[in-house]
Image (cartoon, rainbow, N blue to C red):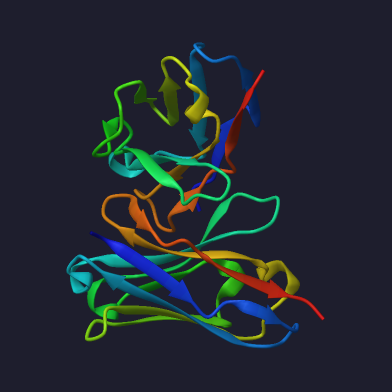
Amino acid sequence: EVQLVESGGGLVQPGGSLRLSCVASGFDFSSYYMTWVRLAPGKGLDWVAYINQGGSAKFYVDSVKGRFTISRDDATNSLHLQMNSLRGDDTAVYFCARWNFALDYWGQGTLVAVSS
Amino acid sequence: ETVLTQSPGTLSLSPGERATLSCRASQSVRSNYLAWYQHKPGQTPRVLIHAASSRAPGIPDKFSGSVSGTDFTLTVSRLEPEDFAVYYCQQYGNSPWTFGQGTKVEVK
C-alpha cells in the first residue's frame, strides 16, 4: 500500500524557518517525481515545488524561489522542504504527493501557520 | 506560464443532474496533458482524469473528460451525494505546471 506521511509543520513567526519531511512507503520512491502542493485558507491548490528522479531537476513556484528548497533522500525514501524567510501568505496545509502522469497519491498534509 | 481558468466558480446542482465543468488554458497544452482532481473537505485530493480524457484507476465512468483546442471539460453524468466537492484542473504539458483556481459543485 502506497503511503506518504508528512511531518514538520507548526506555528512559526514571520521570517522564521521550518523543515517539512515526507516519508514514503509501498512503492519504489526513487523512480518517481515527487512534489509539494499547498492549500491556503480560502484558496485553491497551488504548486510549491517538485523534484525529478535523482534530484537533478527542481521546480519552484515564483513566490517561494530563493526561500524554499526541495530535496530528496532515496536511501531513506524521504522528501524534504526547507522553508526559510516564511511569510504570512505561506500559511497553508502542505501536501506531499507522488507524480505519476498526475498526482496519484497524496499525504494527509501538514499545517504551516505563519503568524506573530 | 499557462494560466488555467475554470468556470463557473460555483455550480449549484441537485443530485441526479449532470455537471459540466470548464477549464480554459491560456495557450495550447502540449499533448493535452491535463488532469482533473476532486477535493472534499478534510480529505486528500483524488485524481479523476489524466491526459484530458483518461480515467484514473478506480474512477467510475460517470466521470469523463474531453478537450477541444484549449478548452477542457469534466463531465459528471449523474451527481451523487459524494460528488459534491471542489474540482481542479492541472496542466503538465507546459513548464511550469499550473492549477486552475477550482470549481465548487454544491447542492442546490
Using the rendered view, name the quadrant where residue B50 is placed: top left
- Work out which quarter of the rendered image holds the C terminus of chain B and state it: top right
User: Front-most of B61 and B7?
Assistant: B61
Q: Residue at x 23, y 59 (%)?
A: A1
> Please, is residue B89 above or below residue A69 in the view?
above
Name, please, the residue furthest toward the right.
A116
Q: Is residue A68 left or right of residue A115?
A: left
Residue lying farthest to the top in this orientation: B17
Residue A27, image x, y percentages:
19, 65
Residue drawn at point x = 31 percent, y = 64 percent:
A3
Residue B34: horizontal and vertical position, in percent?
A: 37, 41
Question: Residue at 60% across / 49% down in the picture?
Answer: A44
Foreground residue, B43 or A29? Answer: B43
Which residue corresponds to the image point at 57% horizontal and 77% vertical from the top-left?
Answer: A9
Q: Position of residue A42 (x, y in %)?
A: 70, 50
Q: Is residue B14 above or below residue B50?
A: above
B57 or B31, which is in the foreground?
A: B57
Is A84 rendered above or below residue A63?
below
Rendered position, A32 above or below B78: below
Number of numbered markers = 0
Residue A100 is drawn in which quadrant? bottom left
